[in-house]
Image (spheres, rainbow, N blue to C red):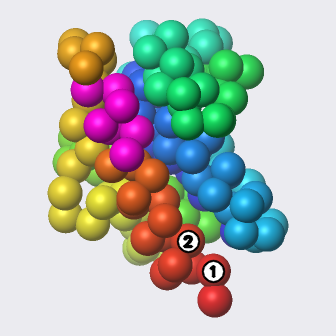
């Protein structure tokens, strides 16, 4: 199973989601590959936000080696599941879908709830970690059978 996590800049939420999902999948003995991307191009080539790196490290997950990249249409061919963090990411990714098969791969990580962007509030990184972790655990339950 190949999963792509998507947020706006690929520096806060989706790198956390990539790290958390890969960690949980590995722990569960699942042969899953997880990556992340952003719908905006401001941070291409950068490491994740230092606050995301710290939030992950505080929970025993190292995301410091990840490199931010832009979501591209070819991701529909490479990934089985594309999980977005909010409705804006959802519409941006769906706008690039070429057909129904592409559209079927795209889901919000938390179902109908959004993962809030912690970028402007340092205190939100730990709670956002926990939200993403809960969402990742649900995805593993749904797709690991």
Residue 45 appears in which quarter of the rendering?
Answer: top right
Of all residues shown, which one is farthest toward the bottom? 145
The span shown in magenta is 124-130
Q: Vertically, is 29 above or below 142?
A: above
Q: Vertically, is 77 above or below 60?
A: below
Q: Is residue 71 visible?
A: no
Q: Quadrant of the C terminus?
A: bottom right
Q: Vertically, is 20 above or below 136?
A: above
Residue at point 76%, 59% (across, down): 26
**Residue 37, position as x, y percentages in the image:** 53, 35
Q: Vertically, is 111 above or below 17?
A: below
Residue at point 33%, 49% (across, down): 131
Q: Which mark is residue 140?
A: 2
Residue at point 64%, 35% (across, down): 60
Categorize mark 1 by other alpha carbons within 10 Å: few (<14), some (14-19), many (20+): few
Q: Is residue 28 left or right of residue 90?
A: right
Q: Is residue 88 left or right of residue 10?
A: left
* Residue of label 1: 144
State the residue in front, 9 or 54. Answer: 54
Categorize mark 2 by other alpha carbons within 10 Å: few (<14), some (14-19), many (20+): some
Number of numbered callouts drawn: 2
Q: Quadrant of the N terminus?
A: bottom right
**Residue 58, position as x, y percentages in the image:** 54, 28
Q: Is residue 143 visible?
A: yes
State the residue in front, 98 or 62. Answer: 62
The answer to the question of whether label 2 and label 1 lie on touching residues, with beta carbons closer than 8 A, is yes
Predominant SS along the magenta part? helix
State how far apart marks 2 and 1 are (Cα): 5 Å
Element at label 2: helix
Residue at point 39%, 60% (across, down): 135
């Amino acid at each position: 199973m190949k999963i792509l996590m998507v947020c706006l800049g690929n520096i806060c939420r989706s790198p956390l989601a990539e790290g958390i999902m890969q960690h949980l999948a590995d722990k569960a003995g699942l042969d899953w590959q997880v990556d992340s991307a952003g719908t905006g191009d401001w941070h291409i080539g950068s490491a994740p936000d230092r606050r995301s790196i710290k939030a992950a490290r505080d929970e025993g997950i190292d995301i410091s080696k990840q490199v931010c990249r832009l979501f591209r249409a070819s991701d529909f061919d490479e990934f089985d599941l594309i999980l977005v963090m909010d409705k804006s990411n959802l519409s941006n990714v769906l706008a690039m879908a070429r057909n129904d098969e592409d559209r079927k791969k795209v889901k919000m990580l938390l179902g109908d709830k959004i993962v809030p962007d912690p970028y402007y509030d340092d205190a939100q990184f730990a709670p956002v970690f926990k939200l993403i972790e809960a969402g990742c655990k649900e995805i593993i339950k749904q797709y690991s059978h």
